[in-house]
Image: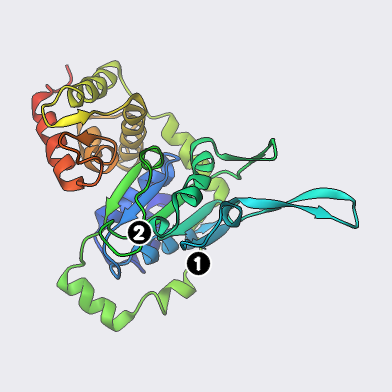
Amino acid sequence: MLDQIARLRKNVASVYLGEAAVIDRVIRCLLARGHALIEDVPGVGKTVLASSIARSIAGTFSRIQLTPDMLPADVIGVTIFDREGHRFEFRRGPIFANIVLADEINRTTPRTQTALLEAMSDGSISIDGVEHKLPPPFIVLATQNPYEFEGTYLLPENQLDRFLMRISLGYPSAEAESTLLELRPSQTVLDRLEPVLSAAEVVTLQQAVDRVKLSGAMRDYIVRYARATREHDDIEIGLSPRGSLALAHAARATAFMAGRDHVIPEDVIENITPVCAHRVFLKGGGGTLNWSAAAAALDDVLRTVGSPA
């Protein structure tokens, strides 16, 4: 199974020329059945990264370019009356896909943002009292610009909590940027990118991740860390039980990608910032906006938590 992950990583890296660690984080989200929020300034490859992941999997893919005038029905679908059949018929929206790229999610209104909430949380959509299941695997890869940018709306905290990871790309290295100028991957390589995994293979990989062992000592380590965030002097609201679960899921996926059948402390530590920094609230009204300060507080918490026995 590691060769399948290697093929996926190589395929994405042929288009996205940024850090390999960023690619691995998005793959972890996929393997852990989580959703990824990719945040950074425009022009650093957020959409290219998300699109290359989607094109590397032979499943259904849809891209939603979110705008301020978009309505919830534009995302999840709408029920219309079929005059010929004399009945109401549900027309599915773009959310019904294996891989959904929600581009610039914070440029649409909170009302439309929350239309994604049930889908991301439960893997289903309810319309007119009828539940519609989404096809597995299902992952939302959302991009957003920093909240200070003109025309952006803050994501509600409960929606942020539905993202397994919040990932910042950063600028590419000088060498990668030079290669990008020559290769122009978004205009050349991306269009020719072929799938390297089927949707069924992704589901099989997800099931294998579920079987990665999380020992009692490692469960205790995650719980002690979560409880320590709730008692830290700089943190108003610490990691919730859902956050603890997310950290465990990400740690399992990290161990699996490393070829291990069990979680070690490094698997947990590796995921603390991307999994936890958007789930805690700092004192002084910082909320979830000051991501770097939250990451620093979480690192400080880590130093107070002893290693597993």
Where disc 1 sits, the SS reads loop
Is 263 located above or below residue 203 in the figure? Answer: above
Is 176 located above or below residue 269 in the figure? Answer: below
Question: At 17% from the left edge and 41% from the top edge, which residue is drawn?
Answer: 295
How many labels sit on residues? 2
Is 41 located above or below residue 119 in the figure? Answer: below
Q: Nearer the viewer, mark 2 or mark 1?
A: 2
On residue 2, the disc is none
Image coordinates for residue 43, horizontal then vertical, percent: 30, 70
In the image, is 23 to the left or to the right of 130?
A: left
In the image, is 83 to the left or to the right of 170?
A: right
Q: Earlier in the sequence, mark 2 or mark 1?
A: 2
| Residue of label 1 | 194
Where disc 2 sits, the SS reads loop
| Residue of label 2 | 152
In the image, is 223 to the left or to the right of 99?
A: left
- The answer for how far apart the CA atoms under marks 2 and 1 are is 34 Å
Question: At 40% from the left edge and 50% from the top edge, which residue is drawn?
Answer: 5
Image coordinates for residue 289, horizontal then vertical, percent: 24, 46
Quadrant location of the N terminus?
Answer: top left
Q: At label 2, which amino acid type do we have?
A: Thr
Q: At label 1, which amino acid type do we have?
A: Glu
Question: At 39% from the left edge and 74% from the top edge, which residue is drawn?
Answer: 186
In the image, is 7 to the left or to the right of 238?
A: right
Callout 2: few (<14), some (14-19), or many (20+) C-alpha neighbours within 10 Å?
some
Image coordinates for residue 208, horizontal then vertical, percent: 45, 35
